[in-house]
Image (cartoon, rainbow, N blue to C red):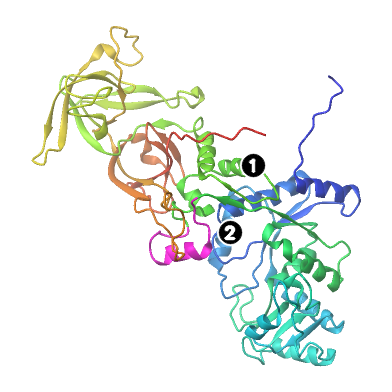
C-alpha cells in the first residue's frame, strides 16, 4: 500500500542514541576509536573502528581517533604509525581529529588534585600485593587502607612529591575513595595514578607518574566532548567507575555515556597481541603484517580490500551477546568483492614444458582473450602464444584414472583461449619425472573461430614460454592447525607446519610484469592473488594468494 512505511531495523546502540537525541540529552553525536599503541590492530578492532565511524557518519556527527597512551612500558611510535595507516585504509575519516591521551596529562593531574581537595582521593603506601589482599573477594568486602584517612593537605603534598619524582616505582599510588564494600570490585578504591619512571613515546621524560586507564579514559572522552563511548563488553563492569570519574570530577555539562557491545571472535585465528609478538620475535612470521595473521596490516598485505572488511563487519552485525564467526565468512567477503572486478590471468605454479611439434618455430601470435568472462566491462587483452608453453604438472598424467579429462597420451584438450592440442609423447629424466610433453595442434580449432567439428572435455591453462615472466608465488593456509584448535594445554599455539608454501620460478603472463604493490588478480583455477608489498621488487615479482576460488561456506539465512 502507498501509505505503508518501510520499517528500518535499528540496532540497540542506535536505539540508545535515538532516545538520547529525542530527550535532548545530547544535540549531536560524537564518537571515537581509542586504541592503546601497544601493538598492531587486528580484525576485531576493525569492527570497533567501523562501528564508531559509521555511527558518527549516520548522525552527521564527529569521529575522533585517539591514542590511549597512558602506559609507556608497552607503547611505541611504530604502533602509532601502523594504527593511523590502518584506520585510514579502512576509510574511517578522522580528518584533523587525531588526539593523544598524553596531551591531557596536565588536565588529568589537575582533575586528580581536585578529587584530593574534595576528599575523594588519597595517596596510599600499600604494596601491590597488599592492595590485592585488602581488596577482598567477590563474596567478602575489602578492608580500608590504613592510609585512607590522610588529611587533604598531606595527600596534596604526597601527590606533588610523586609528580616530582621523589618516590620509586610502586612505592606510592593515588587511589579513589569510593567503597571498599562495593559488590563491584572495580569500585573498591581503585588506583588512579602510579609511579613509573619511564620515557614516554610522546611526552618523553616530562612525567614520572601516569594515570590508570579507568581514570584517564572517561576524562579523555569528556575533554573531547564525546557523547557516546562505544566499547566492548568486558568494560561493562567498569561503567560505574567511568560514570563516577566524570561526575565526581564535575567539570562537564553533558558527560559521555558508555555503551557496550559484543566483541567479534573469529574461529581458529590468533588475535592476542602477546601471541603475535612472540611469533614475530621467534621468527615464525616475518612481522606483524605477515599474511598468515589477521592484523589489519597483514590482511592488507595479503590482498584483502577495505570493502571486503566493511562487508564482513556489516554481516557480523552488532549485538550484546558474544559469539564466534567463521573465518570462512571473511574469505567469502573478499571473493565477492574481487570476482567481478579483477582480471582473470594465467599463471603456472608447478610448471612442465609443453612443446607443440607442428607449430611454426619462432612464431609468436597474440590471442584476444577476455579479462573477465562475467564482466565484459573489463575488456580484452592480447595473450602471446607460441610453440613452447608451460602447463601445470597436475594437468598431465601418464596413466590417468577414469574421468580424468586433462592431458594424457592420445588425449585431446583445449588450451584455454587458444587451440586443441593432442598429446603424442612425453619425456622423463633419470628420476622418472616428466620433463617435456609433446603435442600437435589443430589450427582449425582456434578459440573464437566458430569451429564445431568435434568437442573435447578438458580445458587447461598455460603460459607462453618465450614471453613468460618468472614470479615467486606464496600459498597460505591458516597458521593454526584447525583440527587441533588454537591452543595446546600449556597455552602454546598449535601451529600448522604447512601454513606457507613457496613456489619459485612460476611462469606468469607478461602483462603482469608491471604489477605494483597491492595489485590483485585472479589466477585461473588457482585463486585470487596480490602483489606482496614488502618483498616484491621490479623484475622479481612476489604474489600472495589471498584466497582460493571456491568454498563450501554459505551465508546463514536471515532469521
Q: Which residue is mark 1?
A: 314
- Disc assigned to residue 516: none
Disc 1 packing (10 Å; few <14; some 14–19; many ≥20): few
Q: Which residue is mark 2?
A: 83
- As displayed, is residue 117 above or below residue 201? below
Q: Disc 1 or 2, which lies upstream in sequence?
A: 2
- As displayed, is residue 57 above or below residue 167? above
Quarter that holds the N terminus: top right
Instruction: Work out whether residue 207 can be spotted.
Output: no
Q: CA distance from mark 1 to mark 2?
A: 21 Å
Q: Which residues are magenta?
A: 268-288
Residue reaching furthest to the right: 23
Disc 2 packing (10 Å; few <14; some 14–19; many ≥20): many
**Left or right, residue 388 beside residue 11:** left
Numbered disc total: 2
Instruction: Work out whether residue 303 can be spotted.
Output: yes
Amino acid at each position: 500500500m502507498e501509505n505503508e512505511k518501510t520499517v528500518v531495523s535499528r540496532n540497540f546502540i542506535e536505539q540508545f542514541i535515538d532516545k538520547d537525541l529525542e530527550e535532548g540529552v545530547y544535540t549531536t553525536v560524537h564518537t571515537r576509536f581509542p586504541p592503546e599503541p601497544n601493538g598492531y590492530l587486528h580484525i576485531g578492532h576493525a569492527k570497533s573502528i567501523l562501528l564508531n565511524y559509521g555511527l558518527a557518519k549516520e548522525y552527521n556527527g564527529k569521529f575522533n581517533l585517539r591514542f590511549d597512551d597512558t602506559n609507556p612500558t608497552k607503547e611505541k611510535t611504530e604502533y602509532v604509525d601502523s594504527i593511523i595507516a590502518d584506520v585510514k585504509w579502512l576509510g574511517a575519516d578522522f580528518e584533523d581529529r587525531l588526539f593523544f591521551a598524553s596531551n591531557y596529562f596536565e588536565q588529568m593531574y589537575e582533575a586528580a588534585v581536585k578529587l584530593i581537595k574534595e576528599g575523594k582521593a588519597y595517596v596510599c603506601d600499600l604494596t601491590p600485593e597488599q592492595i590485592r589482599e585488602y581488596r577482598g573477594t567477590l563474596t567478602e568486602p575489602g578492608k580500608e587502607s590504613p592510609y585512607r584517612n590522610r588529611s587533604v593537605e598531606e595527600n596534596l603534598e604526597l601527590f606533588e612529591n610523586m609528580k616530582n619524582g621523589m618516590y620509586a616505582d610502586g612505592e606510592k599510588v593515588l587511589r579513589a575513595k569510593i567503597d571498599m564494600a562495593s559488590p563491584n570490585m572495580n569500585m573498591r578504591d581503585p588506583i588512579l595514578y602510579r609511579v613509573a619512571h619511564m620515557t614516554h613515546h610522546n611526552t618523553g621524560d616530562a612525567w614520572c607518574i601516569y594515570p590508570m586507564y579507568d581514570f584517564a579514559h572517561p576524562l579523555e572522552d569528556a575533554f573531547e566532548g564525546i557523547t557516546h563511548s562505544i566499547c566492548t563488553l568486558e568494560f561493562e563492569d567498569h561503567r560505574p567507575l567511568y560514570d563516577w570519574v566524570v561526575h565526581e570530577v564535575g567539570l562537564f555539562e553533558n558527560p559521555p555515556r558508555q555503551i557496550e557491545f559484543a566483541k567479534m571472535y573469529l574461529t581458529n585465528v590468533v588475535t592476542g597481541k602477546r601471541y603475535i609478538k612472540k611469533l614475530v620475535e621467534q621468527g615464525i612470521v616475518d612481522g606483524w603484517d605477515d599474511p598468515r595473521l589477521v592484523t589489519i596490516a597483514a590482511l592488507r598485505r595479503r590482498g584483502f580490500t577495505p570493502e571486503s572488511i566493511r562487508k564482513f563487519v556489516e554481516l557480523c552485525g552488532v549485538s550484546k551477546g558474544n559469539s564466534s564467526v567463521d573465518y570462512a565468512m571473511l574469505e567469502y567477503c573478499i571473493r565477492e568483492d574481487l570476482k567481478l572486478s579483477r582480471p582473470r590471468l594465467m599463471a603456472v605454479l608447478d610448471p612442465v614444458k609443453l612443446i607443440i611439434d607442428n607449430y611454426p618455430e619462432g612464431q609468436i601470435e597474440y590471442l584476444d582473450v577476455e579479462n573477465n568472462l562475467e564482466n565484459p566491462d573489463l575488456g580484452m587483452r592480447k595473450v602471446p602464444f607460441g610453440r613452447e608453453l608451460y602447463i601445470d604438472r597436475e594437468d598431465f598424467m601418464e596413466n590417468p584414472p577414469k574421468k580424468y579429462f586433462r592431458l594424457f597420451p592420445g588425449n585431446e584438450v583445449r588450451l584455454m583461449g587458444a587451440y586443441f592440442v593432442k598429446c603424442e609423447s612425453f619425456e622423463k629424466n633419470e628420476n622418472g619425472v616428466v620433463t617435456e610433453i609433446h603435442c600437435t595442434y589443430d589450427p582449425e580449432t582456434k578459440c573464437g573461430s566458430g569451429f564445431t567439428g568435434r568437442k573435447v572435455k578438458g580445458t587447461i591453462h598455460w603460459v607462453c614460454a618465450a614471453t613468460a615472466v618468472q614470479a615467486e608465488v606464496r600459498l597460505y593456509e591458516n597458521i593454526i592447525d584447525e583440527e587441533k584448535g588454537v591452543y595446546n594445554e600449556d597455552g602454546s599455539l598449535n601451529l600448522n607446519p604447512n601454513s606457507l608454501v613457496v613456489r619459485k620460478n612460476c611462469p606468469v603472463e607478461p602483462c603482469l610484469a608491471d604489477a605494483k604493490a597491492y595489485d590483485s588478480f585472479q589466477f585461473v583455477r588457482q585463486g585470487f592473488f596480490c602483489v606482496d608489498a614488502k618483498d616484491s621488487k621490479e623484475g622479481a615479482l612476489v604474489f600472495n594468494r589471498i584466497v582460493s576460488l571456491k568454498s563450501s561456506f554459505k551465508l546463514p539465512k536471515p532469521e
